[in-house]
Amino acid sequence: MKHCTHRPPIRSHHANPLAFIENNFLQTLFTLFQAFRRPVIMVDPRIIDPVYDFLDEDTGYCYLGFKFQLCHYGFAVLDKIQCETTHDQVVTEEGCMDVFEEIPDDQKGVLMREKHARYLRKFLHGLNHNFISLEGSRAWIVFWCVNGLRILKQNIEKDLQTKIITFLKTCQKETGGFGGSPSHLAHLATTYASVMSLVSLGTDEALEVIDRNTLYDFILSMKQPNGSFIMHEGGEADIRGVYCAVAVAEMTGITDEKLFEGTAAWVVSCQTYEGGFAAEPFVEAHGGYTYCGVAALAMLHKLTMCNYDRLLLWSSNRQMGFEGGFQGRANKLVDACYSFWMAAIFPILDYELQQIDKNRFDMGCIFDSEALEHYLLTLCQDRERGGIRDKPGKTPDAYHTCYGLAGLSIAQHYSIKERETIVGGEDNLLASVNPLYNVVGYYHELAASYYAEYPFERTLSQPDESTYQAVSDQDKGTESSVYEEPSLAEDPPKSSPAKKEGSDPIYDEPSDQAAGDNKPNQDEQMKSLSLADQGEEEEPIYDEILDDYVQDEDNEPIYDEPYQDEDYARVEEPSTQEKKVYKQPSNHP
């Protein structure tokens, strides 16, 4: 299927319609109907976008041909071959148009901030029995909600923070890594989710939970001889494992040459002839896997190893012309979660390529950030209950809410960089997300400062053979030589003593420059970062968090106060006795 993001498609599918009629009369009638049933809307471009002052009328109408307009049939997908996927695309476009026409003009482009925050908090305060199938993804649910709240610039009350920290402690395994719940094996995907959740809480109490010694051992045990990583013991190896391993290691400061030797070469082998990245070599390129490959290579400082020309071409062509959002693969439908998986690729590439040659790669905005904002704000918000949905006709969920908000943040800060404006004005502005990790840049900086003060020094959790000492016969007074395990000095602390009481740090708006699947009810395994085969140790056991079932809509948890601008003043400078300084986000994505 072909789609056009920048210009209306050519509507004539055959040079000689009369000759074609003789071969396929019904097909021709259907094609003509598809071509002419959609009106071409011609509007003076100066009325649509008064910011631009055109030299003449022809220039204005030429601009209109390139200017995105939400739900404009001039940008709809048309395909000569009619099949199931083309039918689905037409149905999706018509669903988008229905929603677009139902929403009053004064509500289009308005962010329902408080409703989204209320929706996400409901998941943290309790789940009903319908979520039992997501037992292995409870750590993911925590991440989706915590990260979504931080992107919305929301505080998380102290009691809820304590519950989250206690729950994630029980998910951490003695051998390293985190499981999706206390009863599940350690898994790279849920390790990523757990670590990023603790980072997003932004306190020493949360960061102290992470045992970096056993975490290093767990990641190293997942590594394969070819440089790839399996997701869990006995599990599959794909590019998700590489991304999760690299992101967690970089965030916690445990990266070394041994951990990722040969990994970049394996990631590059996953790039396809199309330009995107696949789950493994020789399969189809996919948006989620492309993000994993690009972000992993960028963190390893090896992005130039891939074919970035084809990568840019493939990635930019995933944005849909009619809806404004992104699809995950060629010939697929738009999906809100790819607002992050695809859009986050561009600020990473933008930064990395300008380090190579700023004059050559100073291309400006590589995707239409304004179009993505329109798609998420107008077509994907549930205006009654809160939350963000996949597309019109679907129901919202925590997964799409998290990644939809993250993609909206990426688009907004790209728009600020290019046009100094965002759709809906400053009231819609979200916190800046680091595209490499999908956490708010401010909390990434807190974690970076914390781990910089306490650099990682690996200590063996168990002594190896070299630590055993032979004791002479004379010392033991026996005829045989025996081996005795020495008394080891007490291991150094995993992290610093808590300097704060776990209180929620006041939000400090980061700089506008972005610092750097398991999907509920999703049939495509290629989109999943969290529901991959996770081994179970025993029957599911529910504990303190996510187990206070909400039996009906009237039994809702108590939420904290609505978002107020004055609550987010700048963080005060620490006293002279405190050596820890929280730096503002750097310009590195």
Image (cartoon, helix red, strand yellow):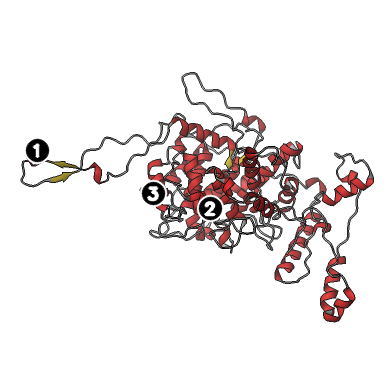
Q: Amino acid at mark 2?
A: Val
> Splitting the image into 4 quarters, where does residue 11 fall?
bottom right
Left or right of residue 124, residue 315 in this image: right
Image mark count: 3
Which type of secondary structure does the marked residue at label 1 adopt?
helix
Pick the quarter of the image with the C terminus: top right
Residue 130 image offset from top left, x and y in percent: 54, 60
Residue at the limit of the structure toward the bottom, as seen here: 22
> Splitting the image into 4 quarters, where does residue 487 fall?
top left
Which type of secondary structure does the marked residue at label 2 adopt?
helix
Q: Is residue 271 above or below residue 19?
A: above
Identify the mark nearer the N-term, 1 or 2. 2
Residue named by callout 2: 267
Q: Nearer the viewer, residue 533 or 547?
A: 533
Taking the spot 5% from the left edge, 46% from the top edge, the residue there is 479
Left or right of residue 119, residue 580 in this image: left
Residue named by callout 3: 173
Residue at the limit of the structure toward the top, as seen here: 576
Picture disc at residue 29: none
Taking the image as drawn, is residue 495 in sight? yes
Q: Is residue 85 above or below residue 366?
A: below
Alpha carbons under labels 1 and 2: distance apart:
55 Å
Alpha carbons under labels 3 and 1: distance apart:
40 Å
Residue 354 image offset from top left, x and y in percent: 65, 39
Residue 363 image offset from top left, x and y in percent: 72, 42
Disc 2 vs disc 3: Cβ atoms closer than 8 Å? no
Residue depth check, mark 1 versus mark 2: number of the one nearer the observer: 2
Residue 432 image offset from top left, x and y in percent: 63, 38
